[in-house]
Amino acid sequence: MKMTPEQIAQYKGVFVFAQQVDNKISGIAYELLGKAKELAESLETKEVTAVLIGSEVKALADNLAEYGADKVIVVDDPELKEYRTEPYAHALASVINEYKPEIVLVGATAIGRDLGPTVSARVETGLTADCTVLEIGDFPLQPIPGKEQLHGQLLMTRPAFGGNTIATIACPDNRPQMATVRPGVMQKIDPKKGAKAEVIEFNPGFTVNNRYVTIKEVVKAVSDVKDIMDAKILVSGGRGVGSPENFKILEELAEALGGQVSCSRAVVDAGWKPKDMQVGQTGKTVRPNLYVAVGISGAIQHVAGMEESDIIVAINKDEDAPIFDVADYGVVGDLNKIVPKLTEEIKAAKAAKQA
């Protein structure tokens, strides 16, 4: 139902769902706080509030303060120890109904993709998923005769139609304005050590009902592979690498550079590499200092996940490959000759430096 201007005016401030797992704040929470500070500066109410939901999590509030939270609303209850849709949705929806934020940001993690839409439905507002750009501006973007152009709206931009176009979406008639944002897209601010936030404890009460699931067992996957989102250097392979065995030459280059191997969706679809190594719109968004794209054509879906890298080097036999449009440096040729030669030169340079 469309809100009246008077109802909309009651909603103030930018809220961030501060996801935690096992009493450890997820990196996406810090990234969203950085963007929230930026958005809040453009609004009359410059306050950023983190919503921390869990069991015995109050001690984590200081971490959120260091990354930009002015206030931390803590919903602490034994029913919130592990993530379950019903109690978490009840907690966040209750916070929204009580404190009336103008904007609510949620990470597009496995938890956020479940929680965000559930909560938006309960508080009767819209939600834009997988946003890549968030800014405050006018809506409609261009004035339309006979239609009021509203100011100070959250403009949520996301890829659409498989990444072939970009859509900018607003929620002018309801509050809060809600968006999910993929990890790695926004940048966290430099932490202010010793910063403190106002901590507000809020508990709406939890009554177990038939929507509460029972967690019988938690099985955690153990992996020796580091998260590619944390890597400073990535050597990424595409279908052009030719075979899973041929990824060995990429692994040798990555080792010489002190980086990690990642890949494109085509490689995952072919079963050569696991999903957690995939860069792109349906994979992970990365921002390394150096991204080496080997045998990757540069489809828009892949580029969306790595275009913010500091330096991009592309190696491809097709001189017309789209990857060269975003690359800072490009090498046209046979990767089977270029990559081993590059690895050899890097090892030689390292040896000379150590001598």
Image: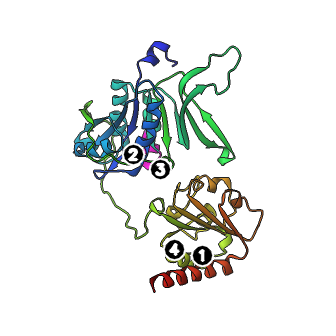
Which amino acid does the dot numbered 4 rest on?
A: Leu
N-term-proximal mark, 1 vs 4: 1
State the SS at label 4.
helix
- Could you say which disc has been placed on residue 244 in the image? 1
Q: Which residues are magenta?
A: 108-115
Foreground tag (3 vs 1)? 3
- Work out whether 219 lies above or below 60: below
Three-letter residue code for mark 3: Pro
Q: CA distance from mark 3 to mark 1?
A: 27 Å
Residue 256, position in %: x, y?
51, 77
Mark toward the start of the polypeptide (4 vs 3): 3
Foreground disc of the pair 4, 2: 4
- First reached walking from the N terminus: tag 3 or tag 1: 3
Check residue 257 in the rendering and tell me which mark sits there, or answer none. Answer: 4
Q: Main secondary structure of the magenta part?
A: helix
Q: Quadrant of residue 230?
A: bottom left
Lower sequence index among marks 4 and 2: 2
Q: CA distance from mark 4 to mark 3?
A: 25 Å
Which class describes the residues within 10 Å of circle 1: few (<14), some (14-19), or many (20+)? some
Residue at the (50%, 84%) spot, across then down: 352
Please report the residue visible at 62 percent of the width from the left and 16 percent of the height from the top.
Answer: 148
301 displayed left or right of 215: right
Q: Disc 4, disc 2: CB below 8 Å?
A: no
Confirm whether the magenta stretch covers residue 22. no
Q: CA distance from mark 4 to mark 2?
A: 30 Å
Residue marked by disc 3: 183
